[in-house]
Image (cartoon, rainbow, N blue to C red):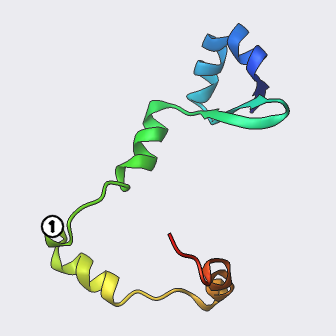
Amino acid sequence: MKVTTTEFQQHVGRYQDAAQLGPVAITKNGRTHTVLVSAAFFEMVMKGRVARPVEELDDDTLKAIANSTVPDEYAALDKLVEGWRP
């Protein structure tokens, strides 16, 4: 669902309820500016994004990381970051 900032401001409760069912894109000047999602969705997305020291990883996780590979179908993505420096 996509709504303008003005529409969102006028009907905040309506879009808070809608966000329980799916993301609500809020546009500003015709472009998506913000996306409203339910707290449950936000928690699900963020849960695995906590940085942990490598010392806290169990042996199975460390083995899985060591044995992981990138499928050939994604090899072209290497070109997107070639030469990139932080």
Residue holding disc 1? 56
Q: How many marks?
A: 1
Q: Is mark 1 on a helix, strand or loop?
A: helix
From the viewer's perspective, is 62 left or right of 13? left
Give whichever of 19, 12 is nearer the camera. 12
Picture residue at 67% right of the left edge, 78% below the top: 80
Give whichever of 67, 27 is nearer the camera. 27
Picture residue at 66% right of the left edge, 86% below the top: 73
From the viewer's perspective, is 52 left or right of 73? left
Picture residue at 25% right of the left edge, 76% below the top: 61
Q: Is residue 5 above or below residue 47?
A: above
Q: Is residue 44 above or below residue 49?
A: above
Estimate how packed mark 1 is, as few (under 14), some (14 to 19) or many (20 or more) residues with alpha carbons within 10 Å: few
Give whichever of 13, 34 is nearer the camera. 34
Say what amino acid the circle numbered 1 marks.
Glu
Name the residue at the right extreme: 30
Q: Position of residue 71 (x, y in %)?
A: 57, 87
